[in-house]
Image (cartoon, helix red, strand yellow):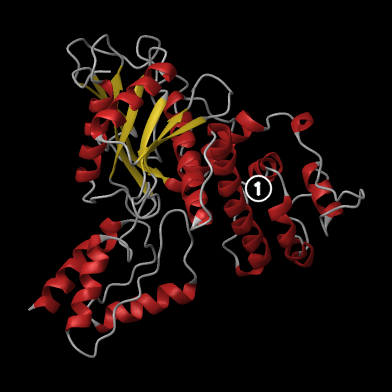
Amino acid sequence: LSASKKLRLKLNDVSEQGVLKYGVQSCHRRFASQDSDLPLLPKRPDGSSKLLQRSFFERLLAAQLDLQTSLACDVSAAQNDIRLLALEHLLLLRVRSLDFNTSSSSHEAHNGFLMKLDKQLYEQLANRLLAAAGVILPASRSAERLHRLGFQTVLVSGAVAILSGNLAEFPPSGASSPSSRKGSCSSQPSSPGSPTALQLNREADEPRILGEASPLPRCWALPLDAELWPEHQLALLSLDADADAPPRLRLLPRALDDAEAAEKLEVWCREELEGSGVAVIFDRSRERRLHWEISVLFSSAESGGGQAVLAEVAAAERATGARAAVGIGGSAGAASPLGRELSAALLRRGGASAVEFPKASSTEQLSVKSVQSFESTASSCGVSERQSSFTAAASWEPKLRTLSDFLKD
């Protein structure tokens, strides 16, 4: 790897929800593309079913029943069984319900079912990758770690599918069907002169055209939150855009010094690359719209590739304004520097209680109550504009920083 041979891709103003849908389709293709690959529904040692609603899930998996047309009472009764399903079951159920709009209040049971399905899917996906890598997580905050890692994997899988043009027959809502040519895609219908979703900026000495000459990056270097992942600093996710093989994951220990970490990372990259590159995401996403600038470091005969990747990851973290990654699509929550600064300023005013930030990210959905509670607190402190999304730091950061400066004075 060499920092001098670098390609930059941009994924601009693309719906996060649309990318997630493509990611679910990609993971389904990699793990459970054929119905014959489905494992049996879980049973007890005596042969009885562990599922209370076994018949309901059998009909769903056999496409004899649609979730959309199922009775709310049946859907609600089946929610507790979701945790017992295998990853292949979860992916198949989610793929078949990608076009189901649950915004109606009459679909509360269906919405709750899908939320539990998504949560279990992310956690089981991360568990599968970690088990294959031989990594055992401690019990502390393991569910939160698995959820975040699984979400990141699905999101990156969707981005790879979009960038490669390896998409399903129908485009999910929030993204239009890109060109079949690799390396080209378009976002939602745009006005004349607006940027396309994918832009190439060649920084290498020789012109590079994304395609056969320069394949899409096979490895994605994802920084890990130091608070959430005290044992590991970086995840290296390997995804082959042209194959249906499951993704592979490796975690870089945090205990290694810079030289050891760079050496281990370089060995891993050389084992996985096969002529492609390592991608590092400069994430500027806002309000569930992805704005990614992807730096791709290509393989070369030079040494120091691990150092180049670590330096690029550090640059990406600085560019997003965070000292430690909060995960793709992070937010200005209580764990962010801005959140801690504002909370401390409120405490110093005497009698004022700290703002309880909802721990919102693109991996979670806020309840209406938590959103209203936070908006009420912010409004009483001088922030009057209401917003419905807390999925990115950019949406609230200017207001909170102004409020923090006011409280300091």
Asked whether residue 270 appears in the rendered view, the answer is yes
Q: Name the outermost residue toward the bottom.
A: 351
At horizontal 76% and vertical 35% (from top left) the residue drawn is 38
Q: Is residue 89 above or below residue 268?
A: below
Q: Is residue 91 above or below residue 271?
A: below
**Element type where label 1 sits in the image:** loop
Quadrant (top left, top right, bottom left, bottom right) of the N terminus: top left
Asked whether residue 295 appears in the rendered view, the answer is no
Nearer to us in this view, 312 or 404: 312
Residue type at numbered disc 1: Ser
Image location (x, y in percent) of residue 29? 62, 30
At horizontal 35% and vertical 71% (from top left) the residue drawn is 357
Would you identify the image quadrant in which residue 232 lies?
top left
Image location (x, y in percent) of residue 13? 34, 43
Q: Name the outermost residue toward the left.
A: 409
Nearer to us in this view, 30 or 249: 249
Image location (x, y in percent) of residue 183? 38, 22
Numbered circles on residues, count: 1
At horizontal 72% and vertical 48% (from top left) the residue drawn is 85
Image location (x, y in percent) of residue 134? 54, 35
Would you identify the image quadrant in which residue 206 lies?
top left
- Which residue does the numbered mark 1 point to in the structure image? 97
Label 1 neighbourhood size at 10 Å, few (<14), some (14-19), many (20+)?
some
Would you identify the image quadrant in which residue 394 lies?
bottom left
Quadrant (top left, top right, bottom left, bottom right) of the C terminus: bottom left
Nearer to us in this view, 43 or 118: 43
